[in-house]
Image (spheres, helix red, strand yellow):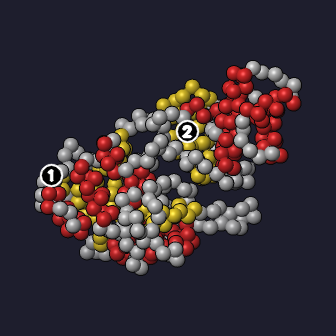
């Protein structure tokens, strides 16, 4: 099979096109091999998986699968919504490296000994991260984040248990009020899914410009455009980072600026953009809790040359709401909604507005301010003080 895969790849270089039955039959015939019709179909499907798909990992794809991981020992793990489970597939070192390099190439990225790690968006919508030895001491590491079989809207997320009717109506109000917000949470908590569902509620006449390091957000909106960063080439030239793209999108007549993930100095440019009349901007941020968001923003702002006081001034003016997601026992849920503001001492802080982590929603000290800012209907504003239950 390895030799046949090599022949197919060489043939595709000479004659680009699909890996179909006529091509495979011709290559087998040239090699003096004769197979039956059923075996030819099976071999063609396998070759197609190796050339255009996930190769030996293709069989792990299935309904509900969100992540496929390969460890240094070649073991493959799958998350189908109930946490990671080990599969029966074990890749050899050569197979793991071949899969990682080929997928990186499909995503338009380089992965070799000179550039031993990669973050890429694959044609099918999956997000790839891979690390080669010697950075990975045991062997090649592969992380694949797979797109949902269908895009969730807010109603679909409500039916799936991500939040209740109250949570959905508050998220809808955040979009309608054009307040700037950040969706926070840990890895795999559903930040991009919730953000995409919220952006789908943006009025069709508004233009959304999305900036990402590796394209991940798929927004069901008629006027959403995406920009993706570019890594430097082997000579160290040609790189375009997120900070540059945030500045570029300001010239693209955006109604909403979206930074797919805040994780570096680009947060400085985002805050500056949101402070120049661009309402409704948003992004995602890794954080353990909503209360940890100020500290995360401060650490990222330091990378962009902002001291804590400057960051607090910029962030308090640019961002309004924190929407925090959590994941427990395989379930992704909206847990907290908080307001961002400056404390009396000038530091950036959050005020809890709505706690959705318990059995019933509970209003926090910032609930009345949030209700007023979002112009929530009276039926949603029955909670007047911290700890009192909010009626859905």
Specify which label sits upstream in the sequence, 1 or 2: 2
Q: For mark 2, what is the residue?
A: 69
For residue 251, say whether it is visible: yes
Task: Give the crowd class for mark 1: few <14, some 14-19, many >=20 residues within 10 Å.
Answer: some
Residue 246 coordinates in the image, percent (x, y): 52, 70
Residue 391 coordinates in the image, percent (x, y): 15, 52
Q: Nearer the viewer, residue 307 or 172?
A: 172
For the point 31% across and 42% down, which residue is it? Answer: 159
Task: Give the crowd class for mark 2: few <14, some 14-19, many >=20 residues within 10 Å.
Answer: many
For the point 51% across and 33% down, which residue is it? Answer: 62
Residue farthest along the bottom direction in this orientation? 276
Q: Is residue 216 above or below residue 274?
A: above
Q: For mark 1, what is the residue?
A: 391
For the point 26% across and 52% down, which residue is it? Answer: 167
In which image quadrant can residue 45 be found? top right
For the point 34% across and 45% down, which residue is it? Answer: 156
Q: Is residue 330 left or right of residue 138?
A: left
Residue 117 coordinates in the image, percent (x, y): 64, 51
For residue 96, say whether it is visible: no
Assign a secondary structure to mark 1.
Answer: loop
> How far apart in space, not on screen, are marks 1 and 2 (Cα)?
42 Å
Q: Is residue 306 above or below residue 2?
A: below
């Amino acid at each position: 099979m390895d030799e046949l895969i090599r022949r197919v790849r060489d043939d595709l270089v000479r004659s680009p096109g699909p890996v179909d039955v006529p091509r495979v039959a011709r290559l087998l015939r040239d090699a003096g091999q004769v197979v039956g019709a059923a075996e030819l179909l099976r071999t063609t499907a396998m070759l197609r998986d190796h050339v255009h798909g996930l190769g030996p990992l293709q069989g792990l794809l299935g309904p509900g699968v969100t992540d496929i991981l390969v460890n240094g020992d070649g073991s493959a793990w799958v998350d189908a919504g109930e946490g990671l489970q080990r599969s029966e597939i074990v890749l050899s070192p050569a197979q793991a490296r071949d899969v990682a390099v080929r997928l990186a190439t499909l995503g338009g990225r380089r992965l070799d000994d000179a550039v031993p790690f990669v973050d890429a968006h694959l044609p099918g919508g999956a997000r790839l991260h891979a690390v080669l030895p010697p950075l990975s001491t045991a062997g090649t590491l592969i992380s694949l984040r797979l797109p949902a079989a269908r895009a969730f809207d807010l109603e679909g997320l409500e039916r799936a248990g991500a939040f209740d009717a109250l949570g959905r109506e508050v998220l809808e109000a955040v979009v309608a009020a054009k307040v700037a917000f950040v969706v926070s949470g840990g890895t795999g908590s559903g930040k991009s899914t919730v953000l995409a569902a919220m952006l789908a509620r943006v009025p069709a006449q508004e233009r959304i410009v999305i900036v990402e390091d590796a394209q991940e957000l798929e927004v069901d909106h008629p006027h959403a455009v995406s920009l993706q960063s570019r890594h430097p080439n082997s000579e160290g030239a040609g790189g375009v980072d997120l900070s540059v793209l945030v500045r570029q999108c300001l010239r693209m007549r955006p109604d909403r600026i979206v930074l797919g993930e805040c994780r570096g100095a680009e947060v400085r440019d985002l805050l500056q953009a949101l402070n120049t009349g661009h309402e409704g901007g948003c992004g995602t941020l890794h954080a353990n809790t909503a209360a940890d968001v100020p500290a995360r923003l401060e650490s990222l702002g330091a990378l962009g040359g902002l001291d804590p006081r400057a960051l607090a001034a910029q962030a308090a003016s640019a961002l309004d709401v924190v929407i925090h997601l959590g994941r427990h026992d395989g379930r992704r849920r909206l847990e907290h909604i908080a307001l961002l503001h400056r404390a009396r001492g000038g530091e950036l802080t959050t005020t809890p507005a709505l706690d959705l982590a318990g059995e019933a929603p509970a209003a926090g000290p910032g609930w009345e301010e949030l209700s007023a800012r979002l112009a929530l209907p009276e039926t949603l504003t029955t909670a007047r003080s911290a700890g009192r239950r909010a009626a859905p």
